[in-house]
Amino acid sequence: MDFFEQLKKNVTQAGQTAVDKAKKAADLLKLREQIRQDKREIRDITYRIGKTYISLHKDDYEKEYEKYFTALEKVKEALAEKEKELQKMQEKIRCTECGAEISPSDDYCPKCGAAVAYETELKEEKVLASEEEEDDIEDDFFEDE
Ligand SMILES: [Zn+2]
C-alpha cells in the first residue's frame, strides 16, 4: 500500500471511529433518559398505591402505616397553619369610613381617624372562609384522579 492509500485508509478509519463514538454517546443518552423515565414511572405508581391505600384505609390502617399517617397529619396541620399565616400577611384591611388601606395592627385609620373596631368582624369571617378552604384541600387529597 502506498503512502496516499494508507493515509486515505487512516482518515476513513478515524472518521468511522468518530461516528461510532457519536453513536455510542447518543445511545448512552437515550438509555439514561429511558432509565430516568422508568424511575419516574415507578415513583408515580408508588405514589398512586399510597394514595389509594389512604383513600381506602385512612380509618382502619394497619399499624405499620401508623407513622406515615401521623406524619401526614402533622404536615397537613403545619401546612394549614402556614396558609392561614400567609392569608393574614396578604390581608388588606380598608377603612369602613373612607376606604383607605389600613394595616391590620392599626386601631385608627391614619387618613380619617375612624376607629377600626368593626374590622374584627370581617377578620373572623375571613378566618371561617379559610377554614372552609382547608377542608377543600383535604377533600382533594383523598380524591381519586
Ligand atoms: Zn378612614
Image (cartoon, rainbow, N blue to C red):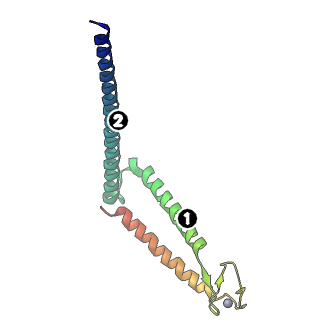
User: Of residues 78 and 102, which is closer to you in this image?
Assistant: 102
User: Of residues 69 and 14, which is closer to you in this image?
Assistant: 14
Secondary element type, mark 1: helix
Label 2 – label 1 distance at C-alpha: 42 Å
Q: Residues within 10 Å of mark 2 (few under 14, many from 20)?
A: few
109 shown above or below 131 = below
User: Of residues 2 and 139, which is closer to you in this image?
Assistant: 2
Location of residue 132 in the rendering, given as x and y in whole percent from the top left corner: 45, 75
Location of residue 95 in the rendering, given as x and y in whole percent from the top left corner: 64, 88
Q: Nearer the viewer, mark 2 or mark 1?
A: 2
Question: Which residue: 64% across, 93% down?
Answer: 97
Tell which circle, 2 or 1, labels the residue nearer the N-terminal end: 2
89 shown above or below 113 = above
Question: Which residue: 31% across, 37% down?
Answer: 30
Q: Is 142 on the left-hand or right-hand side of 79?
A: left
Question: Which residue: 35% across, 62% down?
Answer: 142
Residue most toward the top?
Answer: 1
127 shown above or below 143 = below
Quadrant where the image shows the N terminus: top left
Which residue does the numbered mark 1 point to in the structure image? 82
- Amino acid type, label 1: Lys
Question: Which residue: 33% across, 57% down?
Answer: 57
Q: Is 55 on the left-hand or right-hand side of 91?
A: left
- Amino acid type, label 2: Leu
Pointers 2 and 1 in contact (CB under 8 A)? no
Residue most toward the bottom?
Answer: 97
- Residue 29 image label: 2
